[in-house]
């Protein structure tokens, strides 16, 4: 599965992945942050979703799928993670109230996350991970 690193493209001033062409050709796409100090010093996934929508012409739904279910599949974890499904590991966030899913990429400077649950455990939202 193709994987895009929008944070690296942004930080290194490289061309963004032609996501619209990839998706329109019938291929799935995953997005990740490439969080590291050399090419992408941000692990901010709402920002990666924003970049995917704004710079790579993905819809909000496509970008969220790319960051969740498609990434889990790419990592070989789709049987246990990537969707909110009975029997899967509970890794999810609950957003603050939003007018629509499109507000996530549109409000690219804001953090929509209200509550974080990792491995079924509530994580304080002021925690850096």
Image: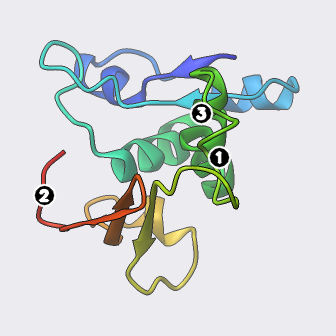
Q: Is residue 75 above or below residue 66?
A: above
Q: Position of residue 53 (x, y in %)?
A: 54, 47
N-terminal of the pair, mark 2 or mark 1, is: 1
Give the label, 1 or 3, closer to the camera: 3
**Distance Cα–Cα, label 2 vs label 1:** 25 Å
Q: Is residue 21 above or below residue 97?
A: above
Q: Is 30 placed left or right of 114 in the picture?
A: right
Q: Position of residue 69 (x, y in %)?
A: 65, 42
Instruction: Judge the density around disc 2: few (<14), some (14-19), many (≥20) Cα neighbours within 10 Å.
Output: few
Of residues 101 and 85, the one nearer the viewer is: 85
The residue under label 2 is: 127
Q: Secondary structure at mark 1?
A: helix
**Distance Cα–Cα, label 1 vs label 3:** 10 Å
The residue depicted at 67 percent of the width and 54 percent of the height is 87
Instruction: Report the quarter where the C terminus lies.
Output: top left
Q: Is residue 58 visible?
A: no
The residue depicted at 28 percent of the width and 45 percent of the height is 44
The residue under label 1 is: 65
N-terminal of the pair, mark 1 or mark 3, is: 1
Callouts 2 and 3 close, C-beta under 8 Å: no
The residue depicted at 26 percent of the width and 61 percent of the height is 109
The residue under label 3 is: 72
* Rendered image quadrant of residue 126: bottom left
N-terminal of the pair, mark 2 or mark 3, is: 3
Q: Is residue 21 above or below residue 100?
A: above
Give the label, 2 or 1, closer to the camera: 2
The residue depicted at 13 percent of the width and 50 percent of the height is 128
Q: Position of residue 91 (x, y in %)?
A: 46, 54
**Distance Cα–Cα, label 2 vs label 3:** 23 Å
Q: Secondary structure at mark 2?
A: loop
């Amino acid at each position: 599965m193709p994987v895009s690193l929008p944070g690296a493209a942004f930080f290194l001033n490289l061309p963004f992945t032609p996501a619209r062409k990839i998706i329109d050709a019938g291929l799935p796409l995953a997005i990740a942050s490439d969080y590291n100090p050399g090419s992408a010093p941000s692990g901010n996934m709402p920002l990666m979703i924003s970049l995917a929508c704004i710079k790579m012409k993905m819809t909000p739904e496509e970008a969220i799928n790319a960051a969740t279910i498609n990434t889990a599949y790419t990592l070989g974890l789709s049987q246990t993670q990537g969707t909110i499904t009975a029997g899967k590991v509970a890794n999810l966030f609950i957003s603050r109230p939003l007018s629509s899913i499109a507000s996530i990429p549109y409000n690219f400077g804001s953090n929509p996350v209200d509550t974080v649950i990792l491995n079924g455990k509530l994580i304080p939202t002021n925690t850096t991970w």
